[in-house]
Image (cartoon, rainbow, N blue to C red):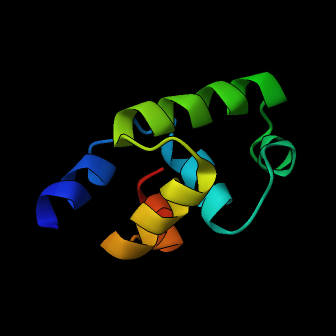
Amino acid sequence: EGENLTVINDLPLQLKPTLARLLTGDSEKQAALQLDLSQHTVHQYVKSLHRRLGVRSRGELMALCQRLGVRVDQLDAEA
């Protein structure tokens, strides 16, 4: 479990705010507006998150974060 949390901690800083927005329930479009990024950029970040974390869907991503106890404030604090 700690090893997997390291994978979250080691994510590039640019991906963490996107992950935080997804964890709050934002769509990619909403995340783009909140983060002042294009929808294309957010979509690319989500694809990168899936690849780096070994998941294939948003549901798997959310389940992984829940299982690891990832909190939004952990991601925002480092972003």
* Depth order, front residue of 68/13: 68
Q: Residue at x 36, y 74 (%)?
A: 67
Q: Residue at x 46, y 60 (%)?
A: 75
The quadrant holding residue 38 is: top right
Point out the residue furthest to the left here.
3
Q: Position of residue 28 (x, y in %)?
A: 78, 44
Q: Residue at x 44, y 44 (%)?
A: 55
**Vertical placement of residue 59 versus 45, above or below:** below
Q: Position of residue 52 (x, y in %)?
A: 37, 34
* Depth order, front residue of 18/49: 49
Give the side of residue 13 with respect to residue 22, left or right.
left
Give the side of residue 31 with respect to residue 2, left or right.
right
Q: Residue at x 36, y 43 (%)?
A: 53
Please indicate, yes or no, whether residue 3 appears anywhere in the rendered image.
yes
**Vertical placement of residue 77 versus 44, above or below:** below
Q: Position of residue 66 (x, y in %)?
A: 44, 74
Tag count in the figure? 0
Quadrant, the N terminus: bottom left
Give the side of residue 59 with respect to residue 61, left or right.
right
**Vertical placement of residue 9 versus 56, above or below:** below
The quadrant holding residue 39 is: top right
Please indicate, yes or no, whether residue 74 appears anywhere in the rendered image.
no
